[in-house]
Each structure stands twice: as C-alpha cells, then as structure tokens.
C-alpha cells in the first residue's frame, strides 16, 4: 500500500512536474502552495504524508507548518532542508525515501 502524499512548495508549475514524476511510482500525490490549498487537501483527502519543499521562504513555511500542526498534527510531516546543491528535483528522491519509510512502518507483520 502506498501513502497518499501532499507536496507543499512555492511554485505550482514546479509542483505539477514533481507530482507527475512521483505518480510514476503509482503514488497518489496532491499539491499545495497556499494555506487555503493545504487546508482544502487536508480536510478533503486522506493524506498520510506531507512533504514540504526547501524553496519556501522561511516566513511562509513557518505559517504553513503552524497551520498543519493545528489542523492535522497526526499526519507525518517531513521538511526538506535548504542545503548546497539542492534543486526542486531533489524533492523526488526525498519524497520517495519518505514514502518507502512510511510503507515499512505501516507494513503488516508477515506470518
């Protein structure tokens, strides 16, 4: 079973490209780039995992994180760090790693 993932970033066009790439792994991906779209997705979809990109300005990211903690504190939340050499495409491998870890944690024990 794959997690349903919400990607959060600043540029909707970039998020659409990342969504299309991640869907190649048979994952359900939603995207958000505003507090309104985050709220809508959290309330209207069954989100298992949230990944926040590194490109958001800190002030905006902090507001979005506070919102998520307020309305959905139980959803697994992962925040990419700004590091040298990171690109928007780095979100693909980061998200895939978090999705695999989610699957391992939520796997049914074998008999």
Image: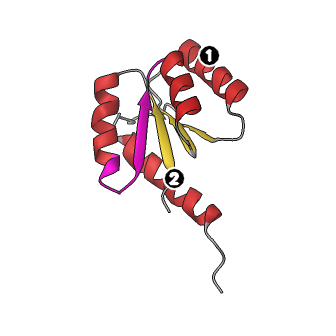
Q: Quadrant of residue 59?
A: top right
Whole-percent x and y of residue 43? 58, 30
Q: Is residue 92 magenta?
A: no
Whole-percent x and y of residue 72? 68, 33
Query: Which range is magenta?
Result: 22-34
Closer to the camera: disc 1 or disc 2?
Answer: 2
Q: Which mark is residue 13?
A: none
Q: Is residue 92 left or right of residue 49?
A: left
| Quadrant the C terminus occupies | bottom right
Is residue 11 shown above or below 21?
above
Whole-percent x and y of residue 17? 27, 36
Is residue 50 shown above or below 101?
above
Q: Which residue is mark 2?
A: 3
Q: Which mark is residue 63?
A: 1
Say what secondary structure mark 2 lies in.
loop
Say what secondary structure mark 1 lies in.
helix
Find the distance from the CA under tag 1 to the CA under tag 2.
25 Å
Q: Residues within 10 Å of mark 2 (few under 14, many from 20)?
A: many
Is residue 85 shown above or below 63?
below
Q: Residue at x 50, y 63 (%)?
A: 1
């Amino acid at each position: 079973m794959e997690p349903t993932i919400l990607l959060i970033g600043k540029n909707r066009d970039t998020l659409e490209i990342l969504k299309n790439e991640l869907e190649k792994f048979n994952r359900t991906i939603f995207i958000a780039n505003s507090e309104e779209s985050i709220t809508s997705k959290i309330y209207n979809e069954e989100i298992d995992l949230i990944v926040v990109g590194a490109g958001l300005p800190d002030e905006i990211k902090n507001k979005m994180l506070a919102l998520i903690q307020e309305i959905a504190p139980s959803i697994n939340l992962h925040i990419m760090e700004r590091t040298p050499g990171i690109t928007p495409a780095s979100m693909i491998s980061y998200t895939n790693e978090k999705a695999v870890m989610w699957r391992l944690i939520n796997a049914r024990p074998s008999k």
